[in-house]
Amino acid sequence: MILTDSLLGFFLETRKHSESICEPLEIEDYVVQPVVDVSPPKWHLGHTTWFFEEFILKPHFDGYVQFDEDFSFVFNSYYETVGKRVVRSDRGNLSRPSVKQVYAYRKYVTKNIQKLFETAQNNELNSLLEIGIHHEKQHQELLLTDIKYILGNNPLLPVYSEQFQDHPIETHEQEWISMEEGIYDIGHNSEGFCYDNELGKHKVFLHTYEISNKLVTNGEFIEFINDKGYERFDLWHAEGWDWVNQNQITSPLYWHKIDGEWHHYTSKGLEIINSDTPLTHICYFEAFAYAQWKGHRLPTEFEWEVAQAYFPWGKRWELTESSYLPYPNYQKADGALGEYNGKFMVSQKVLRGGSVATPEKHTRHTYRNFFHPYLRWQFTGLRLAK
C-alpha cells in the first residue's frame, strides 16, 4: 500500500492527467458517441468522479453533500448494486449536464477527497482511494481510444494531437525465444497494486514452446491482405468468418486504401502506413486468422506471462488465445466493487501487456485486460507463438 501522503499526490496527479487528455478537444467533441462501445469524453470525466463520490465520500465523509443527486443516475456505468443508470447506448444523448458542470463536479469531488484524507487515514480508505485511482487510469486509456474512434469516424479525419505517439517502432530484429517445458507460477505476488482477477497465484504446466520477441508489423499484415486473407474462410473461426462477411471487413480498423496505397487514421490525422510499425486495431478473430496463415498461433496468457521478461512489451495490448476465466480460488469483493471484474468472466479473450494509451504506473506483467473477440478499437496487437 502506498503511504497516504504519496497516495494523495498520486490521486491529484491522476485527476490532472485525465483533463490533460481532453485539452486538445473542441467542446463539440465531448458528447459524441458513434457506437455503443465508445463513451463520450464528458461521460468518462464524470464517471471517474462519480466513482470517488459513490465509494469514498458518501459512505466515509460525515456531512458530505452530493454535488448533484442526478449525477448518480447519469454517471453510474454497470453497478447494479448502486442503482439505476443511463443506458450505455444513450450516453451520447447527454447534452446536459454541460461540460462546464462536469468540470465543476470534478473540482468539487477532488477538493472533498483532499479534505477527507487530511482528517481520516486508515487502510480501508487508502485501499479504496488506490482502486479509484487505477479505475481512473483505466478510463484514461479508454478516453484516448474513444477519442480516436470519435475523430477517426469524423469525415474530416481531424488531428487530435501532434504530441501523442500512437505508432511507435520496434527496432530490434525478430527472433524466436525458446521456453522449456515445466511448471510455472502464475498470478500477482507482490506488495504493489493489482486487481482481483490477477489474484489466486497458482501453478501451470507448459509444454515446450517458442514466442516471438517482436510484434507483428503493418507490413507483415499487408502481406496477409494481399494473399486474400480476408477472403479465405479456411483461416477463420466460423464466428469470425460470419463477422467478416456481415460487417464487410477487409482491413484493420482505421485503414484506408487511397490511390493504391494503404493509409491509416492516427492521432496526427490520416497518414501513409509505415510498414515497420507494430500492427494495431485488430480483433482476436483477425489475430487468429493471421496466425493460421503464418502457420503459427497466438500465445496463451500463461505462456505470455512466463516469457515476458525476454521481450519488450507495453506498446500494444497483446491478444492471447486464453479465455477470460477466474484463477483458482478467485474471490470477488463484497458489495458493488465485486462487480468490477468477476461478472465479465464469460465470452471474452484476455489481452496482456498494456499499450501506448496505458498511463504510467498502471500496467504490470500480471495485468489481465479483456474484451469480446470482435472488438478492435483498443490499441491491440499481435505476438506469435509456435
Image (cartoon, rainbow, N blue to C red):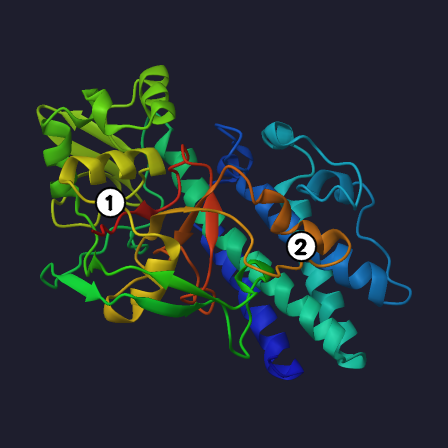
- Give above or below for 352 relative to 375: below
Q: How many labels, in total? A: 2
Task: Check disc 1 and report the residue beneath it.
Answer: 297
| Relative image position of residue 200 (x, y in whole percent) | 56, 65
Q: Is residue 273 visible?
A: no
Q: Which label sits on residue 24?
A: none
The amino acid pointed to by label 2 is: Thr
Residue at 25% over, 33% down: 289
| Relative image position of residue 5 (x, y in whole percent) | 64, 83
Q: Whole-Å distance between the Cαs marked 1 and 2?
A: 41 Å
Assign a secondary structure to mark 1: loop
| Relative image position of residue 226 (x, y in whole percent) | 10, 28
Q: Is residue 342 visible?
A: yes
| Relative image position of residue 339 (x, y in whole percent) | 68, 49
Residue at 31% over, 56% down: 163
The amino acid pointed to by label 1 is: Arg
Label 1 neighbour load within 10 Å: few <14, some 14-19, many 20+ = many
Task: Name the side, left or right, on which 177 lies relative to 369.
Answer: left
Q: Quadrant of residue 65?
A: bottom right
Q: Which label sits on residue 49?
A: 2
**Residues tagged 1 and 2 counted as in contact (Cβ below 8 A):** no
- The residue nearer to you, when weighing 41 against 202, is 202
Task: Name the side, left or right, on which 97 lies relative to 136.
Answer: right
Assign a secondary structure to mark 2: helix
- Give above or below for 343 relative to 363: above
Which mark is in front, 1 or 2?
1
Q: Quadrant of residue 253?
A: top left
